[in-house]
Amino acid sequence: MDLISLYPTWYEPTVGSGWVVALIATFHVLASHTSVGAALLFAYLSHKAYREDREDLLDFIKKYGLFLLVFTYVAGSITGPGIWYSTTVASPNGIGALIHSFVWKWATEWVFFVIEVVGVYMIVYLVGKVDKRTHMKISVIFGLASWATMLIIVGILSFMMLPGKEQWFADGGYLNGFYGTNTFIQLGMRTAFMFTITAVVGGIVIAGIKDPAFKKEMARKLGWLGIISTIVGALMFQWYLTAVPEQALLVMENRLPDYFMPSIVAVLAGTLAYFIITMIRPQTLVQGFAGAMAVIILVAGLWPEETARESMRKPWVAGQYVYSNQVIGRDVPGMDIKSQLPLLEKVGILKAHPFTPEHLREVNEGNKIQAGEFIAMTYCSNCHSPSETGIRPLHRYFPEGVSQERVAKYVKGVLTTGNIAYMPKMPMTDSEVDALAAYLVLNNNGGQAAVTAAIDSEIAQRDRALAEKNASDKVAALDFVQEVK
């Protein structure tokens, strides 16, 4: 039997797997961007401390470094494996595509990360134990290693949107896939925003400074850093949009909520206002206020940005050949990869999926809702929640009281043909179309309770049929024994 490389679907019923990944990723991006921006800031401050013989700057570096050790290199390092685990179970083929293409790039990134981790310990614990010139050199190495990790990760993120060159599909090669048209624009944008994050988080450290003059100086330094980097990052975001595929712009126009752009503008305005206020009145920087503003600004800014980045790739999740539902939707001769769509068009998803329960491989009246639910989980749940909560619930896309015939026409005319640019092509047999339509209508009109009741009824009916068959077989066996005697 022909099977395709699909895995069991991870479905979290309350928020969906997409939101679980997004929650972990948002916190990790906050921590990782803070560490990279702070690393480059430390390099600058260490140089200034060396040139001007400033002990107070070294003390500030030490305090900020201690904060990083707890915030970034503990909490951030926990969410790093959290991203690997959650994305691997949510999108195994997507992660597999990245590993197969960039395993040595990732290995290189881990080398730089080790240098980064060792560097932050040396920066914190060698203050006053080595001369300022040596400390400056350590800070520079730490800063460059941190930024190198971002360079590599941004290259991989760019591939997730679009391979660097069309040639990659035919020839493969990580250099063809790594340096996308938007790689360095995205790198510049992220570098700018990481300085914004560094300046915001740095306010928590500034709040603990006792010397009013030094507190004012650092508030001005980080204030100007934050203002300039926020403006530059916003301008580079506009430039970045000119370097993404037209399909990504179509997704932004149709899938992002109407409040997305106004919310981004509001966050940028609020961030600039915060920096201006703290520059004019540094005494407002107290621990509670600085901490609260860091959470508000960074979460409000990072959440929509990460949501937009994830949404803009649709219907692909990696390299424009792995669909968001894990189906391989394109031939990639350079990687010896074949599209799975022809097989799905021939036999359907239920027969091609290796983890389809045996009793669901053929659709009949006794398993139609169960089969429809399995198809929805396989094809749809990575982007749509079957329940009333979570990411893009399915019931929002159909009017109340919609008929099964109408839904079946939609499934067959749109989903199986891939006629929506930001949704994957989902080949199905006619019986699978009917099963999915039956499930969607029941889920839409009656909710999960109705689906559960229908499945329970199907299971009970199957159990009765099995019991009757077993009883019939037993009678036949006894008759056979009697005949033999």
Image: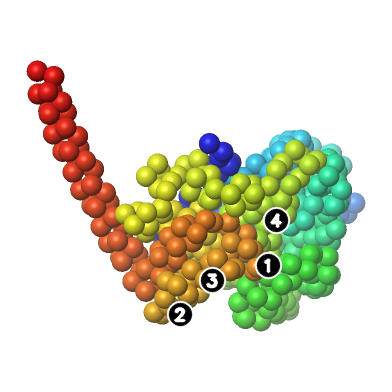
Where in the figure is residue 290, as x and y percent of width and height? 61, 68
Q: Secondary structure at mark 1?
A: loop
Mark 4 or mark 1, whichever is nearer to me: 1
Where in the figure is residue 388, as x and y percent of width and height? 41, 69
Which residue is painted at 74% across and 47% down in the image? 331
Q: Earlier in the sequence, mark 4 or mark 2?
A: 4
From mark 3 to mark 2, how far is it between C-alphas? 13 Å
Report the amino acid beneath label 1: Ala
From mark 4 to mark 1, how far is it between C-alphas? 33 Å
Q: Earlier in the sequence, mark 3 or mark 4?
A: 4
From mark 1 to mark 2, how far is it between C-alphas? 22 Å
Where in the figure is residue 450, as x and y percent of width and height? 31, 66
**Disc 4, disc 1: CB below 8 Å?**
no
Q: Secondary structure at mark 3?
A: helix
Q: Earlier in the sequence, mark 1 or mark 3?
A: 3
**Disc 3, disc 2: CB below 8 Å?**
no
Report the amino acid beneath label 3: Tyr
In the foreground, 156 or 483: 483
Q: Which residue is mark 1?
A: 421
**Disc 1, disc 3: CB below 8 Å?**
no
Q: Which residue is mark 2?
A: 399
Q: Which residue is mark 3?
A: 410
Which residue is painted at 60% across and 77% down in the image? 257
From mark 3 to mark 4, how far is it between C-alphas? 43 Å
Residue 352 at least partly seen = yes
Q: Which residue is mark 4?
A: 33
Q: Residues within 10 Å of mark 3 (few under 14, many from 20)?
A: some
Which residue is painted at 72% across and 41% down in the image? 337
